[in-house]
Image (cartoon, rainbow, N blue to C red):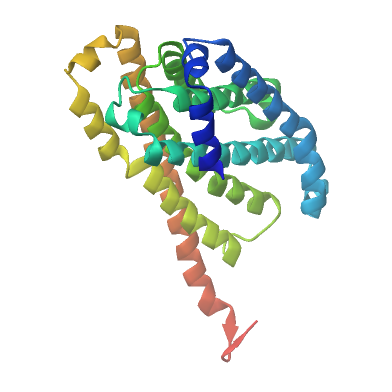
């Protein structure tokens, strides 16, 4: 159904779409604003209402924990929406895959504008609730991404690479779920927590670390080509700088996740013999 809708969208408005998707067009600005407002609404209204009904433990959290809970709930919803859109583009948008630098960026712009609205919304919440969810690395991450997306939305360049970076969002739900289990009091060696931890480490590695050779090999394949030199110096700087900056943080986060996963698995193995006495589990 989703694919049929996108296909219909492209065929129904071929000419209007080309005009509307000009640099910083009204359509892109509208999508970004709607995205911003929607994620603010989800944070302030939907998440508190739904969480209190789905998880009774939410009502027992303190004020700071509720703020972070709502922030992570919105983050998960954004990751799933944008991640699925990203996969569709990766597999079915031939124009972007054939020309990674200047391929028709229409669908990528829509996806990136949704993410732009989310990032600005999240930055606002981070600064406003700094004592609860303030994190300098997230600020750097968001600003680096927005800097790169400026060129994607403004000049329609590098759509393949912009979309490829969004694959990383698939690791977000597991990272957030780990925090949900922790704040709800689940033991680190509990089966749900351990299963999520292993899945988190695997997915994070898959979509943020293992894809690096593919990403940078594609980058090297277009380096020095005519399409590459048509990209402005600022665009090239944003592309390369943001990629390196984000991947350095990804490696740092992967190291922390791997260490944490190893410690939990190790402690669970040690605790098993201690939990038995005379062949019976305590």
Q: Residue 171, can we see it? A: yes
Percent position (x, y) of residue 108?
A: 45, 27
Residue 204 higher or lower than 107, as above or below = below
Q: Residue at x 58, y 59 (%)?
A: 193
Camera-side residue of 250 and 217:
217
Q: Residue at x 49, y 44 (%)?
A: 170
Figure quadrant of the C terminus? bottom right
Figure quadrant of the N terminus? top right
Residue 258 higher or lower than 220, as above or below = below
To which quarter of the image does residue 279 belong? bottom right
Q: Residue at x 65, y 18 (%)?
A: 33
Residue 4 higher or lower than 53, as above or below = above
Residue lying farthest to the left in this orientation = 224
Percent position (x, y) of residue 241?
A: 34, 19
Q: Residue 259, can we see it? A: no
Percent position (x, y) of residue 212?
A: 30, 38
Percent position (x, y) of residue 29?
A: 59, 14
Camera-side residue of 228 and 236:
228
From the viewer's perspective, tell me whether residue 217 is left or right of residue 250.
left
Labels in figure, total = 0
From the viewer's perspective, tell me whether residue 189 is left or right of residue 206.
right
From the viewer's perspective, tell me whether residue 186 is left or right of residue 266.
right
Residue lying farthest to the bottom in this orientation = 278
Camera-side residue of 215 and 4:
4
Q: Residue at x 51, y 79 (%)?
A: 273
From the viewer's perspective, tell me whether residue 245 is left or right of residue 123.
left
To which quarter of the image does residue 207 belong? top left
């Amino acid at each position: 159904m989703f694919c049929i809708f996108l296909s219909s969208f492209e065929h129904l408005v071929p000419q209007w779409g080309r005009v509307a998707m000009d640099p910083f067009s009204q359509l892109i600005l509208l999508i970004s604003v709607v995205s911003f407002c929607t994620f603010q609404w989800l944070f302030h209204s939907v998440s508190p209402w739904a969480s209190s009904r789905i998880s009774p433990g939410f009502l027992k959290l303190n004020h700071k924990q509720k703020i972070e809970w709502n922030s992570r709930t919105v983050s998960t919803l954004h990751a799933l929406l944008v991640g699925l859109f990203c996969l569709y583009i990766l597999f079915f948008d031939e124009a972007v895959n054939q020309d990674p630098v200047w391929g028709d960026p229409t669908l990528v712009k829509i996806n990136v504008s949704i993410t732009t609205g989310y990032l600005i919304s999240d930055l606002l919440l981070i600064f406003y609730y700094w004592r609860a969810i303030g994190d300098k690395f997230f600020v750097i991450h968001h600003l680096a991404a927005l800097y790169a997306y400026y060129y994607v939305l403004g000049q329609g360049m590098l759509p393949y690479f912009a979309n490829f970076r969004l694959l990383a969002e698939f690791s977000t739900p597991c990272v957030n779920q780990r925090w949900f289990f922790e704040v709800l009091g689940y033991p680190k060696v509990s089966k749900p927590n351990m299963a999520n931890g292993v899945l988190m480490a695997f997915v994070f590695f898959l979509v943020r670390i293992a894809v690096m050779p593919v990403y940078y090999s594609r980058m090297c394949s277009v380096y020095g080509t005519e399409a590459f030199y048509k990209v402005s110096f600022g665009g090239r700087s944003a592309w390369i700088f943001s990629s390196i900056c984000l991947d350095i943080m990804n490696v740092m986060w992967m190291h922390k996740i791997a260490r944490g996963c190893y410690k939990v698995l190790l402690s669970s193995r040690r605790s098993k013999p201690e939990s038995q006495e005379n062949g019976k589990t305590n």
